[in-house]
Amino acid sequence: MAEGAAAARAVISLEAVHKRYRSDRPAVLDGIDLQVAEGEYLAVMGESGVGKTTLLNLLAGLDRPDAGRVTVDGVDLSTLDDDATTLLRRRAVGFVFQAFHVLPYLSVRQNVDLPLRLQGVDAGARRERTEQMLAALGIGALADRLPRELSGGELQRTAIARALIHRPRIVLADEPTGNLDPRSAAQMLALLRAQIKAHAGAGILITHSRAAAQTADRILILDARGLTTAERD
């Protein structure tokens, strides 16, 4: 079992989680245990193919374990049907991806505003929170631009703003700086950490970068043995 993070205040919990996609292949995840505490920002490292993205998909309810239990913000995901899982994800989870996944036909403001629209937040509150988030991430002046008019760093800031605008309890970041130069990556990681600490219950960063992992409170290594705590530099 991964060390640290008191279970009593866990925002994220995995208990003996197994996941296998093909019967003739080894399990992608085999008996994984994890507790992520209130306010904790965690980095998970590991070689390609060890199951890091699968781990995030299970936490988001995008995939289901073959065995074991996944609990997010106090809810056992196995108790939810697809519609309820979607509603939980929309309310409690924010994603930041390496590929940004912003909608090309929407402006920066509209992309960031979208999660609030899906939650039915009224127009005045949406406008206020969106402007505050854009300002916090330094892209207020870009609000009316389309994604094709943005740099990689600006796109990533937009993606982070959209992921955090609805103040999710859980932030999941999958290689969010893979397309950025070192300076932009460092800026994005600092912004991501600050926003997670300010507004989220817990955050998980998936990364191959040791430098990126060092920005987290705790670093875990995922391999065939499971999750183990890494020494900090």
Image: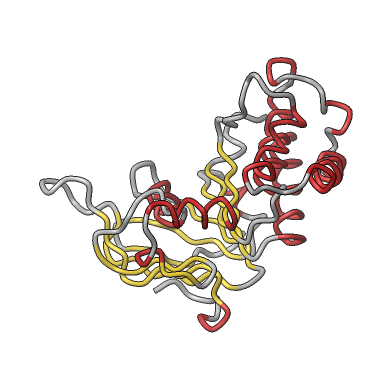
Question: In the rendered view of the protein, which quadrant contains the C terminus?
Answer: bottom right
Give the x, y percent position of residue 162. Answer: 68, 41
The residue located at (62%, 29%) in the rendering is 102
Image quarter (top left, top right, bottom left or bottom right) of the N terminus: bottom left
Q: How many marks?
A: 0
Q: Nearer the viewer, residue 218 or 113?
A: 113
Residue farthest along the left direction in this orientation: 24
Q: Is residue 96 left or right of residue 154?
A: left
Q: Name the spot of residue 146 as percent of width and height, x first.
A: 73, 19
Q: Residue furthest bottom?
A: 8
Judge by depth and name the residue closer to the eye, 110 or 45: 110
Q: Measured along the vertical axis of the image, is residue 161 above or below residue 99?
A: below
Coloured how? Answer: secondary structure
Horizontal side of 143 relative to 97 (left or right) equals right
Residue 163 is left or right of residue 129, and the answer is left
Q: Is residue 121 above or below residue 113?
A: below
14 vs 79, nearest the viewer: 79
Q: Which residue does the image show at 42% across and 49% down from the upper left?
A: 57
Q: Position of residue 186 (x, y in %)?
A: 72, 42
Residue at 82% from the left image edge and 23% from the top image edge = 144
**Residue 164: x, y in percent?**
69, 49
Write down the quadrant of residue 226 in the picture: bottom left
Q: Quadrant of residue 219?
A: bottom right
